[in-house]
Image: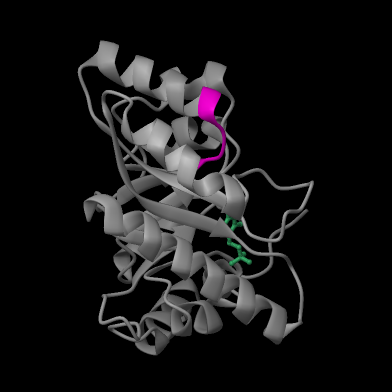
Amino acid sequence: MISENVKKLLGEVPLKNPFGESVSVVAAVKTQHVSAINEAIAAGITKIGDNHVQEFRDKYAEITGNPERHFIGHLQTNKIKYLIGKCDLYQSVDRLPLAEELAKRSKSAGVVSNVLLQINAGNEETKGGFSFEEAESAYAAVKKMQALNVLGIMAMLPFTDDEELLRSLATKVRAVYDKLNAQDGNFKYLSMGMSGDWKLCVECGSNMIRVGTTLFGKRNA
Ligand SMILES: *Cc1c(COP(=O)(O)O)cnc(C)c1O
């Protein structure tokens, strides 16, 4: 079942977005058993993203196939130490104190950490991230921090069926991505789109989607 879902999704995701960039798929694995995750990897998933440090740690050694490990959830600064050197991409850098602590811990461990700046596109109180207005100063601050490599933006869009709203927000995120990337040309990833909206997001310029439900089915609450 999972393996068919993976093959179906990988068949549907276009090789390139309208900007000519390849589109990668990150499996959002929160609450999934190791067996399910390993089945997805065996079927072609090469990147997995966790939301919880505890789950990341518990499953770490049991994951097979050597996928990239991403962190995509709210990260408490006191838990960074468990991820240092093990996380290939911190997608959810949503506040400056988190970036500062990540830089400090990375430096003392002698590693460089790859990060994305999280944008809260709908300005929702329940979601973390920088607003559109804050994005530029956040990038200026984080790119100066030692031992961090800012590779792009991760965007959270509101849960809504309003396609027009989603399209306008996703387009705005892409414009911010292009504007910031024009400064240094260091960006690789615009991570935007989940099970319900990834097609629209890729059409608007996302080049990395984070998909859970489509691969693993509905999560138990
Ligand atoms: C759970 C989650 C996803 C995947 O959501 P689905 O709707 O199940 O595809 C993507 N991004 C983040 C940050 C998540 O927490």
Please give the name of the residue rendered at 76% of the width and 74% of the height, measured from the top-left corner.
Answer: 160
Camera sees residue 50: no
Q: Residue furthest top?
A: 108
Does the segment drawn in magenta span residue 94? yes
Camera sees residue 188: yes
Residue closest to the eye, 191 or 45: 191
Name above or below for residue 175 compared with residue 129: below
Q: Give the x, y percent position of residue 8.
A: 43, 86
Name above or below for residue 79 compared with residue 58: above
Does the segment drawn in magenta span residue 207? no
Q: Give the x, y percent position of residue 35.
A: 45, 54
Q: Give the x, y percent position of residue 44.
A: 30, 70
Please give the name of the residue rendered at 34% of the width and 65% of the height, measured from the top-left corner.
Answer: 45
Q: Give the x, y percent position of residue 172.
A: 55, 70
Residue closest to the eye, 64 or 182: 182
Residue closest to the eye, 1 or 56: 56
From which residue to which does the magenta span run? 93-97
